[in-house]
Image (cartoon, rainbow, N blue to C red):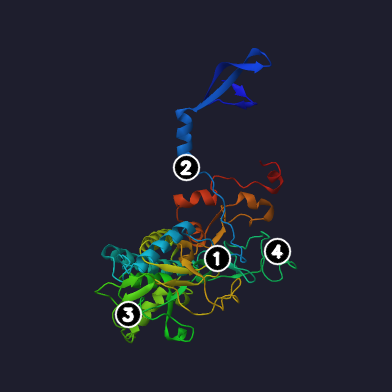
Amino acid sequence: MEILNSVSFSSIGVGRTRINKAVKVQVGSQTQRIGWKLTRTCCEYSPDTYRRQAKYEQQPQNVDLPELQPKNKKKPFPVPIKKMLQDSRRDKRLAQMRIEKPLEAPKNGLLVPELVPVAYDVLHNWKVLIRGLSQLLNVVTVYGCRKCPQVHVGPVGHQIQDCYGSGSQRRNSHHSWARGSINDVLIPIESYHLFDPFGRRVKHETRFDYDRIPAIVELCIQAGVDLPQYPSRRRTSPVRMIGKKVIGRGKFVDEPKPHRSEDCVSLLAELDTFSNQQGQSPSPSNVKDLAERTLKAYLTVRRGVEQLMSKYTVKACGYCSEVHVGPWGHNVKLCGAFKHQWRDGKHGWQDAVIDEVIPPNYVWHIPDPSGPPPRSSLRSFYGKAPAVVELCVQAGAAIPDEYRPMMRTDIVVPDCKEARWAA
């Protein structure tokens, strides 16, 4: 073992090579020979080091907690700007040569047959998720702050001073807790339902002519799910485009009136969180199984939506939480976020990510719900998890492997007096 610069290379092979060089230099009328020595240090990692590094990459011990996005800045683009410019230049060159843009399903209005079962599976698990959360809320208590969007899952609200709502200075940044609902755990993200996504755009004057439904449900409908109360146009011929201009979409078809019946109304209640505020309290013997099913449905919905979004276009505003399912965003002027006066209230549309369609709504992870509530002095020892995951875990479900590093399950929360001695 060799030590260089007070660093111990116990698991790294270190070797040195000495090189002697000499050159001739003309100094005045005489030639002098000058030589020097070079020392080259070579470090090679042992196989054990690579093995430990690969194991850490597969199962990281801890990950950084998610940062809050500033409200005075635009969200970052999910697609690099360089790639967006390259695609735009390619489409512009094709348009100048009057060549149609090559479109594949579903960009041309046709369905993707292999994704239709995925859409039905996502919609089924969405119903299971809403039904399970409405019942688990009778077992696990959820609190929401009256002044800010913070949510806490546990018997008592936490004492971490991170409230930035109105009047937070008078309360020393303490939260003002109130009893929460399913909308605090599963944030509702709605979108306009379109009979024909390639048809007329939603304008500001005609916004009340369209229904607002959960964005996940609208994505499943456009991916092939047939619901009688929300009809959708199924094309048999593809849409044709030259550049940004649509040259062949077929004639405009009037939207049929939705079929309203008692069965349809009951189905709507299963798809919307606003209609499932409180469910029946489960029996104590079924709480753990219910939590496992609810957590499995949540993970299945996220995987399925991410698979559907890889093909179907979903747009999100770069300034607010508005989401639109379709090839283009709508023209409703209801954006009140940063610099909305410059845009006349219009949304800044860009490609959406999975966290904008299903917001995780991170909350503090409570290792022991029966113990003392979290404190500000120990916040560096606590982890975070999505509200749905934390609710199911406190109800008895096992912690998923993908959320263990963020929840920091391997860290023991010290006492207040021990925290100052912790590294």
Residue picked out by circle 1: 141
Say which amino acid is labelled 1: Thr
Residue at the extreme left: 236
Circle on res. 188: none
Residue 160 in picture, x, y percent from top left: 66, 59
Asked which quadrant contains residue 177, the reply is bottom right
Residue picked out by circle 4: 173
Residue drawn 43% across the image and 86% down it: 209
Position above or below: 126 against 66: below
- Mark 4–mark 3 distance (CA, rounded to whole Å): 48 Å
Residue picked out by circle 2: 57
* Secondary-structure class at tag 1: loop
Say which amino acid is labelled 4: Ser
Name the N-terminal-most of marks 2 and 4: 2
Horizontal placement of 175 versus 116: left or right?
right
Residue at the extreme front: 29
Residue drawn 42% across the image and 68% down it: 314
Disc 2 + disc 3, Cβ < 8 Å: no
Q: Nearer the viewer, residue 282 or 367?
A: 367
Name the N-terminal-most of marks 4 and 3: 4
Depth-wise, is mark 1 or mark 4 nearer the camera?
4
- Mark 1–mark 4 distance (CA, rounded to whole Å): 22 Å
Depth-wise, is mark 1 or mark 2 nearer the camera?
2
Disc 1 + disc 2, Cβ < 8 Å: no
Say which amino acid is labelled 3: Pro
Residue drawn 50% across the image and 44% down it: 60
- Mark 1–mark 2 distance (CA, rounded to whole Å): 35 Å
